[in-house]
Amino acid sequence: MKPRLIASRQFPDSVAARIGAEFDCPFPAGRDMDAEETIRRLSETKADALLFTSHLKFDKDVIDRIPEHVKVAATCSVGFEHIDVAAARARRLVVTNTPDVLTDCTADLTMLLILGACRRAHEYEAVMRAGWGRGFGMGEMLGRKVSGKRLGIVGMGRIGRAVAQRARGFGMTILYTNPRAVAAEDALGAMFVADLPGLLGQSDIVTLHARGGPSTANMMNAETFALLPEGAVFVNASRGSLVDEAALIAALTSGRLFAAGLDVYHNEPAVDRRLAALPNTFLLPHMGSATVETRTAMGMRALDNIAAVLAGRPAIDPLWS
Amino acid sequence: MSKPVLLVTRRLPDAVEARAARDYAVRLNPEDAPRTAADILRLSQGADAVLCCPAEKLDAATIGALPPTVKVLGTFSVGFDHIDIAACRVRGLPVVNTPDVLSVATAECCMLLLLAAARRAGEGERLIRAGQWTGWAPTQLLGRQVSGRHLGIFGFGRIGRELARMAAAFGMVVHYRDVARADPAQEAGAIWHDDDDSFLAASEMLSLNAPGGMATRRWLNGERIARLPRGAVVVNAARGTLIDDPALIAALGDGQVGFAGLDVYDGEPALNPGYLALGNVVLLPHLGSATAETRDAMGHLVLDGIDTVLAGGAPANLVR
């Protein structure tokens, strides 16, 4: 008999195909489930496992209502801000995420944000969509060159290191700050700076790859933006909670920042309309891992975790151990 | 001794105009008004040098009618299709341009187009600006991963080689097509193809970096597009004439080409309206080299050339 699974979201075709082949799963095609329906279906089907994403706020109230027969819940994401880990531990529910598989994809998108912000991609695209029809003067609509600039990386984890690797192709000088210096073979010539203020003062372009949570909330604020060199470029593809958006908007308006490239926001999916009204922003809707390849790999990794736990083996990516 | 007289036909970056004003009795164009050939002939009376731009067509008649005082012509561009070089030779007028300094900025533009097209940045951007984003979803706006893919570069000149270097940092496998194989030091691991078939079949992503002209006109036509892997990504920051637009538009519509990113167009500053009806293209208005750093470097290089000719020397950036 196949294990019983509830998938509370739509997944790419090949992930859906594997769910169909390996699990007994009443899969409502074309529609996502809310918490109430998820809990109801878990009970009705006597499900063994749950596959979900950050759309489901996995707080204590929801976790406490997960029926006893559910042994593992796998979030198809690397982040787990939507999960009350303490409540899940108390309930003895194994919860897993999908690290590693989205590193390259997110690093690619970070470089896209850097290039798009420096080279004014939003303004250029808008010119084209309005029909163009006029060549520009030699001093008009100029962007900033990326190559040769100083790149400051805040958070030298997997994604930060993958960004550094790509930035080397642009001859950039790479600086980073991190709770502690990484091993030389991981830094590959990137220079460690002990604290954020020290890093910001030396960065023409700064990119955030830090964890969320209270210790990093609003780490970029009026005070820290003011430490950047005049005309710096700011990029964030990690967590919206890291940035005080009012301060960001002020820095973009005053010229302290030349431009910003963002993939994450404080109150997603409600993007501050003032950001969307600025010409010197390049804004994407949380697409860091949005490729067929990566989303498929994330789904497969989540299913690997579920399969391992249901087979009595340890989870591959448990949120705690 | 009075300063030599320099006519600058269009507005140039501040640092370049400042240098020109320091070294020359300079005739600037602060309004950046377009200049006709007749304007240039009128404004260059008594000038020692003319610094022109690619929008101005300097044909044989115009070159022949330039005042005899003009000893050197500079162009604020790497290309010189707009200047009748043969007529300059007959007139004994040296021409200086701005080679090399645009390569890196233009290669950056290729990388931007590649990433933006493959990752559906145009669609994502429009969703946010319209205030229509409803939140993250596992199957929303899924694009194609760039890192680790096979990239085909058509034309392995300076810009193509810069792009290859950037792509290698994304773990891409680089293939190139050119008339001859580059020397191994310049190749840096890129794979040369001496025929279109094997090159196109390998190109999951394709960047056009060849010169314009008749030999490459509409090189990327329907027949070659059909030989790309299905769903390929195509980018062009070189010359609009390299692409058969109706064929590419059809392929973007039926999925043979998944995504495209363009900075140049056949007939620019107009473009085939078929592109504007497509969501899976990212379009930029020929600003491949448009960075402040690059434009400054171009201005300084062309002024270096003009200085050298007027001082009786032979500049490195002389058009031959």
Image: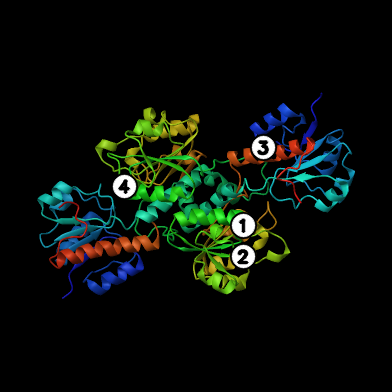
Determine contact: label 1, label 2, CB under 8 Å.
yes
Q: Position of residue B217 (x, y in %)?
A: 69, 64
User: What residue did someone put label 2 on?
Assistant: B178
**Amino acid on which the number 2 mark rests in the picture:** Asp
Say if labels 3 and 1 share a chain: yes
User: Residue type at mark 4?
Assistant: Gly
Task: Determine the CA span between mark 3 and mark 4.
Answer: 41 Å
B36 vs A227, left or right, is right
Q: Is residue B228 above or below residue A257?
A: below
Q: Is residue A305 left or right of residue B5?
A: left
Q: CA distance from mark 3 to mark 2?
A: 31 Å
Q: Residue at x 22, y 71 (%)?
A: A23
Return the x and y of residue A224 as percentages of the image width and height: 37, 30
Position of residue A37 in the picture relative to residue B262 (left or right)? left
Residue at 21% over, 71% down? A24
Which residue position holds label 3?
A: B300
Q: Which one is in front in this view, the residue at disc 3 or the one at disc 4?
A: 3
Q: Chain of mark 2?
A: B
According to the image, what is the colour scheme of the structure?
rainbow
Image quadrant where one finds the N terminus of chain B: top right
The residue mark sitting in front, 2 or 4, is 2
Contact (CB < 8 A) between labels 3 and 2?
Answer: no
Question: Residue A99: x percent and y percent?
Answer: 28, 55
Mark carried by residue A157: 4
Q: Are marks 3 and 4 on the same chain?
A: no
Q: Amino acid type of disc 3?
A: His
* SS for callout 3: helix
Residue A43, compared with residue B158, is above or below; it is: below
In the rendered structure, find residue B157 and report the number of the disc placed on it.
1
